[in-house]
Image (tube, rainbow, N blue to C red):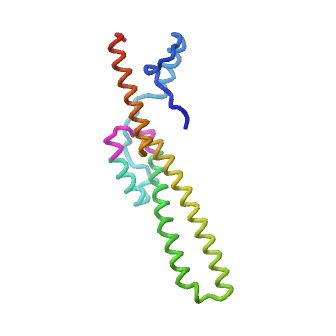
C-alpha cells in the first residue's frame, strides 16, 4: 500500500515559498469541501440486498463522518459486490446438495453432466473468492477494516497535532 500523502499544513519537509504555494493551489483544487451523499445510487436501489448493505454501512460511516460524495460510488460498488457474494454463497451450496441427491441415479452421460456442473460450481466458488478480495480492498480504502480505521485515526491525530503546533508558533 502506498504511503498516504500529507496536506501542506501537516508537512515537516521544508518547501520554498513557490513550492508551498504551488502545493497549496493543487490541494485547493482537489480537496474542496465535499458534501455528504444526497441519495442512494441507482445501482444500489435496484438490488434489495445491496440497499440493505448501503443502509447498514452508511449508518456506521455517518457516525465517523468520513463519507463524502466522492466516496459514495466506491460504497455503491462495495454494496453491489457484497450482494453478489451473498447470492453466490446461496447458489453454490444449493447446487451441491442437488447434485449429491441425484448422484446415485445417474448413468455415464449423467455423470459427465454432473462433472460439468461440478466444474461450474468450482468456477462460481472461485468467483466468490475474487469478489470477497475486492470487497476487502474497498472496505480498507473506505476505512471499514481495523487497519483502515487505524490509518484514519493516525491522520486525524496528525491533523490535530498540526493544529496545536500552529497555535504554538503563531501561524
Q: Residue at x 45, y 49 (%)?
A: 76
Which residue is at a point 47% across and 44% down the rendered structure image? 140
User: What segment is highlighted magenta in the picture?
Assistant: 60-72
Residue 66 magenta-highlighted? yes
User: Residue at left 44%, top 53%?
Assistant: 79
Q: Residue 27, image x and y in percent?
A: 48, 24
Residue most extreme to the left: 63
Q: Is residue 42 left or right of residue 122?
A: left
**Residue drawn 34% across the image and 38% down it:** 65
Tell me the quarter of the image containing the N terminus: top right
Q: Position of residue 46 (x, y in %)?
A: 43, 58
Q: Is residue 15 above or below residue 38?
A: above
Q: Identify whether 56 is placed above or below 33.
A: below
Q: Which one is nearer the viewer's eye here, 155 or 91? A: 155
Q: Is residue 113 toward the left or the right of residue 48 in the image?
A: right
**Residue 50, quarter of picture:** bottom left
- Is 45 located above or below residue 63 in the figure? below
Residue 93 horizontal/vertical position (percent):
50, 72
153 relative to 159, above or below: below
Q: Does the magenta portion include 98? A: no
Where the C terminus falls, by quadrant? top left
From the top left corner, tell me how far across and down residue 123 is, in percent.
61, 65
Q: How many marks?
A: 0
Amino acid at each position: 500500500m502506498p504511503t498516504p500523502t500529507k496536506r501542506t499544513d501537516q508537512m515537516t519537509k521544508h518547501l520554498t515559498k513557490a513550492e508551498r504555494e504551488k502545493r497549496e493551489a493543487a490541494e485547493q483544487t482537489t480537496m474542496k469541501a465535499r458534501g455528504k451523499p444526497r441519495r442512494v445510487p441507482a445501482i444500489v436501489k435496484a438490488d434489495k440486498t445491496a440497499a440493505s448493505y448501503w443502509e447498514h454501512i452508511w449508518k456506521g460511516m455517518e457516525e465517523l463522518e468520513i463519507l463524502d460524495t466522492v466516496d459514495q460510488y466506491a460504497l455503491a460498488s462495495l454494496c453491489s459486490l457484497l450482494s453478489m457474494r451473498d447470492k453466490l454463497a446461496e447458489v453454490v451450496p444449493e447446487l451441491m446438495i442437488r447434485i449429491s441427491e441425484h448422484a446415485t441415479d445417474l448413468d455415464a452421460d449423467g455423470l459427465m453432466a454432473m462433472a460439468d456442473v461440478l466444474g461450474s460450481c468450482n468456477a462460481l466458488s472461485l468467483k466468490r473468492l475474487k469478489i470477497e478480495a475486492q470487497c476487502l480492498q474497498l472496505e480498507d480504502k473506505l476505512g471499514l477494516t481495523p487497519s483502515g480505521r487505524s490509518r484514519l485515526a493516525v491522520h486525524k491525530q496528525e491533523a490535530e497535532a498540526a493544529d496545536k503546533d500552529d497555535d504554538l508558533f503563531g501561524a
